[in-house]
Amino acid sequence: SLLVTSGDAGDGKSVTAWNLARTAAALSPQSTVLLIDGDLRRPRIAKLAGEAASPGLSELLTHGLSIREVVRRCTLDAGAQGRHRCELQVITAGALAPNPAELMQSEKLRSVLRDLQQHYDLVIVDAPPSAVVADAIPLMTQVSGVLVVVRLRHSRRNSLRRLREQVSRLPAPCLGVIINDARRSDFGYGRYYGYGGRAGRRAAPAPPLERRPPAETMT
């Protein structure tokens, strides 16, 4: 399992989590990949996936819905020229909850994550920016590793320092840092190697997926 977070809002963590999940599903069509929107304050996965926001994680935690009732099954093209199909499953954030911090610390969420990690080959959680709100901290104790998204010219150093301190005190290792919104001039290699393309353009999110009925395997 993998948690994706950032120091500040607007660093691009949700798009990064979305594209990581799509890529993992496409590269290993036989594997089961689940993307969870764990940002209950500013959710984005539903919009990226072209899905309705509810029912989702908040309803799963507060309304007694089953996992099967909130999982969306999506299909996408994989392989050269889209000759193969693969599946990505998604749990959206659901309706905005008045107490997101309490939900993130609940035993119900810990139990749900344990069940999901046993059922899926890979679970990716899009978490809130950890240096802004504390919601992501309980989630970090339930995953195998953490990826940090940094947006150049946007992420604040103080926020990143706080995030580093938080991660260092938790059992989940930081697996790496993803640099977002980078330009060739930031690294100095573009002209030497002669790579084409316009510098400084932000990567667009992948298109929404085709929706399919939820899986029947979870209860």
Image: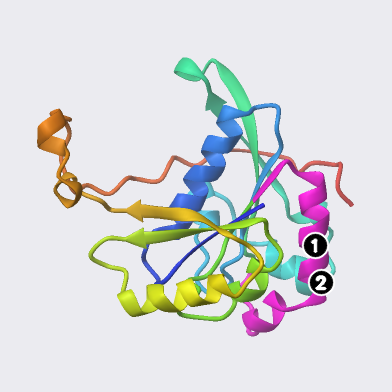
Q: Amino acid at mark 1?
A: Val
Q: Amino acid at mark 2?
A: Lys
Q: Residue furthest right?
A: 219
Query: Does residue 155 appear to the left or right of 130 in the view shown?
Result: left
Query: Does residue 204 appear to the left or right of 54 in the view shown?
Result: left
Mark 1 surroundings within 10 Å by alpha-carbon count, few (fewer than 14), some (14 through 19), many (20 or more): some
Residue contact between numbered discs 1 and 2, judged by CB atoms under 8 Å: yes
Identify the image quadrant of residue 88.
Answer: top right
**Residue 145 x %, y %:** 61, 56
The disc label shown at residue 108, or none: 2
Which residue is at 56% across, 81% downward? 134
The disc label shown at residue 112, or none: 1
**Residue 54 x %, y %:** 65, 62
Q: Nearer the viewer, residue 212 or 18?
A: 18
Tell whether position 120 is magenta. Answer: yes
Tell whether position 149 is magenta. Answer: no
**Residue 104 x %, y %:** 68, 75
